[in-house]
């Protein structure tokens, strides 16, 4: 009996394109599904140290919902690096002005914080409306 673990080779990786419709779904639930697809955790050939994931298109980000009182309480923060450079944007404002950025930040936070995560996030496309420009790739709809 062979007790070796199978590890996928770089030329054996097959990538598909998936569409996730975020309309009327919680932001975090959509983000976890997208992160799972980007990493490739849904595949039997998942390898933790390689980028084996698929391309993901998230549409209708402007119709995403936040449960509980997050719409009023959640705050997006970033710092410029300078003294007094803290910027705070409430979730209500972020979802009204830049829903794509809110979705991107949620998905990016669920990926590894290293070079693998930076490589993986490049396979993500986020759109506020229902239209996207990746028809040529023949994406499949991902239901969850």
Image (cartoon, rainbow, N blue to C red):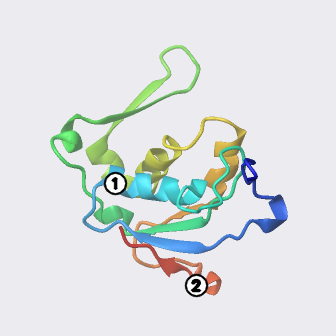
**Closer to us: 111 or 46:** 46
58 vs 14, left or right, is left
The earlier-in-sequence mark between 2 and 1 is: 1
Q: Which residue is mark 2?
A: 135
Q: Residue at x 59, y 79 (%)?
A: 134
Q: Disc 1 on helix, strand or loop?
A: helix
Q: Which residue is mark 1?
A: 29
Instruction: Give the label on residue 12, or none.
Output: none
126 vs 102, left or right, is right
Q: Residue at x 16, y 40 (%)?
A: 69
Mark 2 neighbour class, 10 Å CA radius: few under 14, some 14 to 19, many 20 or more:
few
The furthest residue to the left: 68
**Closer to us: 99 or 66:** 66
In percent of width and height, residue 93 lies at 30, 46
In percent of width and height, residue 110 lies at 49, 43
**Closer to us: 113 or 103:** 113
């Amino acid at each position: 009996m062979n007790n070796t673990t199978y590890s996928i080779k770089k030329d054996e990786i097959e990538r598909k394109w998936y569409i996730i419709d975020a309309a009327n779904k919680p932001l975090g639930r959509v983000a976890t599904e997208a992160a799972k697809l980007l990493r490739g955790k849904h595949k039997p050939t998942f390898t933790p140290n390689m980028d084996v994931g698929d391309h993901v298109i998230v549409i209708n980000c402007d119709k995403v919902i936040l449960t509980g009182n997050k719409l009023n309480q959640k705050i997006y923060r970033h710092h410029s690096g300078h003294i007094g450079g803290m910027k705070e944007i409430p979730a209500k404002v972020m979802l009204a002005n830049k829903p794509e950025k809110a979705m991107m930040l949620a998905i990016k936070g669920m990926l590894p914080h290293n070079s693998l995560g930076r490589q993986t996030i490049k396979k993500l496309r986020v759109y506020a409306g229902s239209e996207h420009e990746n028809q040529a790739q023949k994406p499949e709809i991902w239901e969850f």
